Image: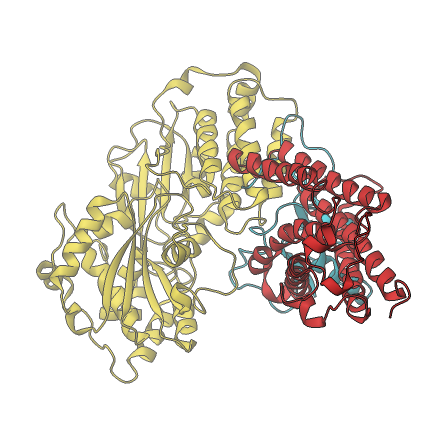
Chain colours: A red, B cyan, C yellow
């Protein structure tokens, strides 16, 4: 029925990629902010402003990403799937991860907008969920994304992961948190995530038959004719 | 309105002095010195933005009449000696309050 | 019309309940009778009783604030006495616990509350034991329906600050917190809290018995009544003395057996107080008005006579370093400022001070005043800057030549090594 990818399909992929980049910018600033780097051209309130703006923009692009995915007729994705994880017919696990990331970001955003009322303590506790939202978003992108083979998107993903890895290294290097075990743990977890991806990707999303393995409904799969699906 | 800082919450991030240098300067350890003069109408928006920017919500705007009776906590003080921001005295490293 | 009042009948033994009733009469039991609360408030207002813990806040005003509160208040006896140079509160609990209890129970009745907490430094074993025995002697607390319990607070200079005690009872953390809200609005378990120094409560007990006019027969118009002072240093018999406000410094020194050697200077108010040179203090009168021209105050009733043979620079440097350590380490200006001041003072004492050492110390002192959550940095700043003026010559000498022979002598100003460090 569909003659080719609709404009929604393009929009959802593009906005997803942009959201990931913006989220990465925000997370990198959040991680490295403890270094309190400042310069005459880059006062702290500007860095803080970029952090807040990038986060809000990421959420805005996320909303576009979700709405266009729902509107697009190709994949059976409903609005519920976007908010309640693992309920979809289309690649339930990988799409569900996206819903998880979105829920976490909703919590972080809502509490940040209400920070003055909540007080610093409560806000800070929830804000830690932001750390979880990023790797979940990355996995969602690899698992669900149909552009995963494209060089441009691979490059974006690699850049994002490298940026976060660098930020964590900076933070650990200046001695944060104070507990040595926690520092090694943080660095270890991030490195393990990056290496895990490197090990997983070739046989996974970049490998043969991923769409079927990821849970794309059978009627949407292109018939295997010796080429990649 | 006047500005007040909660010295326990303050962690010397310094955004306040960047945003409102008319009322806030940093001492040699990076902690804010708040000018107790009232905030005129022309600075009120900026003051609100500054309060919002504080990463630990240590900065507060108070109505002029509200003043703690004992006067001990959240007192703001104008330092007359003139040193603002800038380098610490030689050899004095700023200490962390953690 | 004479002393002793609080110390009436005090001797080496603890005054048990029977003796207490013989000496002072039965505890006031106006209790919960209608109008009793208002009468007590009126008496306290007329008496003009101010706190004896150093803050000198009018007790009647605190009582009124707590009476206005909607929830049932808690009464707290502050016997933590964090200032090492003061022993009067400890002494009161050891010798005259019933007088302190009487005062606390009067306030509890006036507030129609059943809860009294007695906060005692955890290292004051004798005082705690004595208060425990006293409580057992009054199982029904003499007709009051209050329940009193003892809470041991960790040792520390700032752990005895009002909000620190409340914070400790609420959350286990013995560090000051910022106000508002004031304790009389919200304190222990979010209830209004009336906290008072142990000695203040002893005076309440006497005012409740004898009335405000009796209280005002001693002292000055603007500073009525008597007070306990701890006198130490170069006197023959250091200890706790009861003075009438406005009396001469000389008379309490006589009561202490006189000076053991010529005095270099006097320290008034403890480690948060200020110094007055020996000559200037010669005719000093012990009252706010008497000491104000000398830029000093009694604080929690502390007087130290620093003998000629002591080295003021070493004493001040040691105390400043200790005060820096005793910071709750919550506020940047205090941690950094007191630390810097102490470092430079030690440098000066050992002859290493830079050219600007004294200018730096004065600048830091001004920089820390008023910028902490409690008055700890203000006190240290005052102690240090008054020392710089009073002992200008000695500080100069040390800056030039380093340690002097007097530096090695046994310290006059004791700094206790705490059993438990008060740190984050």
Closer-to-camera residue (B60/C10): B60
Residue found 68% across the figure and 66% down from its top:
A89
Is residue B3 among what the camera can see?
yes
Image position of B29 (left or right of C34): right
Is residue C295 among what the camera can see?
no
Closer-to-camera residue (A19/B14): A19
Q: Position of residue C322 (x, y in %)?
A: 44, 34
Closer-to-camera residue (C349/C173): C173
Exactly how many numbered labels are in the figure?
0
In the image as oriented, which residue stretches furthest toward the bottom? C34
Is residue A67 positioned above or below C292 on the image? Answer: below
Q: Quarter holding the N terminus of chain C?
A: bottom left
Residue found 11% across the figure and 61% down from its top:
C137
Q: Position of residue C78 (x, y in %)?
A: 33, 56
Res C408 → quadrant: top left
Res C419 → quadrant: top left
Q: Position of residue A152 (x, y in %)?
A: 86, 45
Res C224 → quadrant: bottom left
In the image as oriented, which residue stretches furthest toward the front? A225
Image position of C91 (left or right of A38): left
Closer-to-camera residue (A44/C340): A44
Is residue A174 positioned above or below C37 on the image? Answer: above
Is residue C3 positioned above or below C68 on the image? Answer: above
Residue found 80% across the figure and 48% down from its top:
A228
Q: Position of residue A11 (x, y in %)?
A: 86, 62
């Amino acid at each position: 029925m569909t003659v080719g990818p609709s404009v929604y399909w393009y929009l959802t992929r593009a906005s997803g990629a942009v959201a990931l980049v913006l989220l990465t910018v925000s997370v990198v600033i959040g991680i490295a902010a403890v270094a309190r780097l400042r310069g005459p051209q880059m006062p702290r309130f500007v860095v803080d402003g970029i952090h807040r703006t990038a986060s809000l923009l990421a959420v805005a692009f996320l909303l576009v990403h979700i709405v266009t995915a729902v509107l697009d007729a190709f994949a059976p994705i409903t609005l519920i799937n976007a908010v309640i994880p693992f309920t979809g017919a289309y690649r339930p696990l990988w799409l569900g991860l996206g819903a998880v990331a979105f829920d976490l970001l909703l919590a972080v955003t809502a509490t940040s907008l209400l920070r003055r009322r909540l007080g610093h303590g409560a806000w800070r506790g929830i804000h830690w969920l932001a750390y979880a939202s990023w790797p979940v978003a990355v996995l969602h992108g690899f698992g669900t994304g149909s552009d995963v083979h494209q060089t441009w998107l691979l490059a974006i993903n690699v850049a994002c992961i490298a940026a976060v890895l660098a930020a964590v290294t900076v933070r650990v290097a200046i001695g944060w948190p104070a507990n040595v075990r926690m520092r090694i743990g943080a660095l270890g977890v991030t490195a393990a995530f990056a290496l895990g991806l490197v090990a997983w990707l070739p046989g996974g999303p970049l490998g043969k038959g991923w769409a079927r393995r990821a849970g794309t409904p059978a009627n949407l799969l292109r018939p295997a004719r010796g080429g990649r699906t | 309105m006047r500005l007040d800082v909660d010295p326990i919450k303050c962690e010397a991030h310094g955004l306040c002095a960047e945003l409102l240098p008319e009322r806030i300067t940093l001492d040699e350890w990076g902690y804010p010195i708040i000018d107790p003069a009232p905030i005129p109408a022309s600075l009120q928006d900026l003051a609100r933005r500054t309060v919002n920017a504080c990463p630990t919500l240590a900065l507060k705007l108070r109505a002029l009449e509200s003043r703690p009776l004992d006067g001990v906590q959240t007192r703001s003080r104008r330092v007359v000696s003139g040193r603002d921001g800038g380098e610490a005295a030689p050899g004095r490293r700023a200490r962390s309050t953690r | 019309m004479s002393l002793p009042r609080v110390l009436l009948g005090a001797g080496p033994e603890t005054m048990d309940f029977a003796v207490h009733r013989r000496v002072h009469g039965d505890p006031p039991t106006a209790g919960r009778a209608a109008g009793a609360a208002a009468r007590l408030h009126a008496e306290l207002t007329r008496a003009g009783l101010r706190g004896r813990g150093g803050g000198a806040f009018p007790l009647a005003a605190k009582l009124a604030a707590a009476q206005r509160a909607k929830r049932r208040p808690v009464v707290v006896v502050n016997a933590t006495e964090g200032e090492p140079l003061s022993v009067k509160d400890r002494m009161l609990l050891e010798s005259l616990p019933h007088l302190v209890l009487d005062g606390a129970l009067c306030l509890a009745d006036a507030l129609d509350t059943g809860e009294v907490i007695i906060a005692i430094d955890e290292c004051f074993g004798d005082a705690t034991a004595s208060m425990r025995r006293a409580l057992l002697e009054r199982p029904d607390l003499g007709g009051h329906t209050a329940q009193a319990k003892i809470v041991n607070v960790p040792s520390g200079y700032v752990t005895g600050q009002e909000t620190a005690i409340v914070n400790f009872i609420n959350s286990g953390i013995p560090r000051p917190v910022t106000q508002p809200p004031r304790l009389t609005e919200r304190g222990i378990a979010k209830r209004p809290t009336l906290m008072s120094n142990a000695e203040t409560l002893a005076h309440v007990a006497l005012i409740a018995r004898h009335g405000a006019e009796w209280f005002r027969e001693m002292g000055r118009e603007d500073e009525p009544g008597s007070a306990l002072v701890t006198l130490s240093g170069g006197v023959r018999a250091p200890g706790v003395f009861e003075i009438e406000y406005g009396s001469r410094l000389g008379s309490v020194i006589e009561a202490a057996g006189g000076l053991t050697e010529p005095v270099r200077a006097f320290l008034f108010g403890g480690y948060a107080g200020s110094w007055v040179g020996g000559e200037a203090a010669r005719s000093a009168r012990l009252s706010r008005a008497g000491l104000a021209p000398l830029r000093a105050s009694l604080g929690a009733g502390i007087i130290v006579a620093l003998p000629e043979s002591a080295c003021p620079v070493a004493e001040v440097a040691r105390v400043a370093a200790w005060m820096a350590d005793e910071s709750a380490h919550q506020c940047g200006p205090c941690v950094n400022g007191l630390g810097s001041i102490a470092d430079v003072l030690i440098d000066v004492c050992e002859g290493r001070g830079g050219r600007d050492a004294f200018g730096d110390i004065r600048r830091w002192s001004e920089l820390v005043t008023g910028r902490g959550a409690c008055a700890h940095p203000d006190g240290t700043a005052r102690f240090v800057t008054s020392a710089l003026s009073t002992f200008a010559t000695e500080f100069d000498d040390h800056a030039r030549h380093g340690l002097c022979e007097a530096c090695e002598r046994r310290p006059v100003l004791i700094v206790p090594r705490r059993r438990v460090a008060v740190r984050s």
